[in-house]
Image: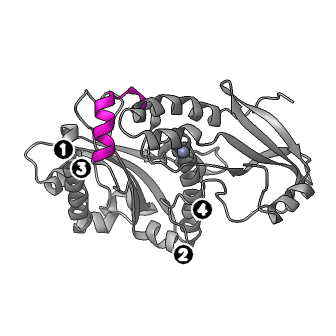
Amino acid sequence: MTEILQETDFKKAKLQSAEIVLKYQNFNPKKAKNIHKCGDWLEFAKKENIQTLEQKLKLQNADFCRERYCPMCLSRKSKKLAVEFYSVLKHIEAQNKVRYIFVTFTVKNPLIVDLRATVNHINQSFKRMKETKRFKNSILGYLRSTEFMGSKTPEGEAHPHFHCLFVVPAKYFDTKHKLYIKQDEWREMWQKALRVDYLPSVDVKIIRPKKDASDPIASAIAETVKYPIKSEYLTKMSDEDFEELNYQTKGLRVLATGGVIKEALKKLKLDLEDDTDLIHFSKQEDEIWRLIEILRYEFENGDYRLKEIKPPARENEEQKNARPHTR
Ligand SMILES: [Zn+2]
């Protein structure tokens, strides 16, 4: 039984974790230990579609550490966000005819020691911008995520910026309604909100529903909703900057919502930043899938290797007995 797990996301995260663990060992051995152990074993339910006989593996048990900068947990949070946000947009589209735009708001790079103050400043600035008439008239709702670093951020600096998915009415693009906000105007609005004397850079992308795509929401999400912190950036940082980043961002929230998105989240009882369950994402389980068996993989010598196959009946017994020997 040395079959290797085909799904590679877990392995990729686990290998990135090794680099992050080294960084934490310098200043926080406890976090290093947590991240090192995170996702050491994974249990998947092997399921079969009773109509098509197609088979799939679904994660059903694991031990995740939930540390903010753990690559494994970041990868799970990112998936969770995509799944939950999908249902949010579906919910909105069922009631309104909407379109989406994706806007990135940037400020001049602060020193990394000033990151927290700068994040507070851009949060306040965004608040000012969203209170303007122009914004309120054109934007129905938003998901805003905060990133702290970029791929080319020089050492000693940070690159805080917002990625925003804006829900706009379908008539937003119809010039006679005067709702459309051009890039230049976004820059002016953002400058005014920031109260700075330079024109900040703002990037605007219109998400076009692909004509042949059966599901335009899915492509919008794939393009735009990524979890704020990319572990690739973290592994590239110097040890000193990484330690400072931890200090500067402690407790900061990285996601914010407003308007129709906020309302939909409330209605669907979802909290996009809740990381208490990083195993199951969607609450509704398809009934057409039949559980065949449970596969347990353990991370060993750089790969997830199949260690145990359990029949579903036995798994149920174990759940009753509080999983005596699976940990
Ligand atoms: Zn973790």
> How far is the residue under mark 2 from the one under mark 3?
32 Å
- Residue density around tag 1, few if under 14, some if 14–19, many if 20 or more, within 10 Å: some
Question: Is the CB atom of the residue marked by disc 4 within 8 angstroms of ligand 1's nearest atom?
Answer: no
Asked if the residue under mark 4 is in contact with the one under mark 2, i.e. CB atoms within 8 Å, the reply is no
Query: Callout 3: helix, strand or loop?
Result: helix
Query: Which residue was labeled with disc 2?
Result: 267
Comparing labels 4 and 1, the label whose residue is closer to the camera: 1
**Label number found at residue 87:** 4
Please name the residue that numbered disc 3 is placed on. Answer: 116
Q: Are marks 2 and 3 in contact (CB under 8 Å)?
A: no
Say which residue label 1 marks: 114
Question: Which segment did they paint magenta?
Answer: 233-247
Pick the front one: 173 or 88: 88
- Badge 2: residue crowd in 10 Å (few <14, some 14–19, many ≥20): few
Magenta span: predominant SS is helix
Q: Earlier in the sequence, mark 1 or mark 2?
A: 1
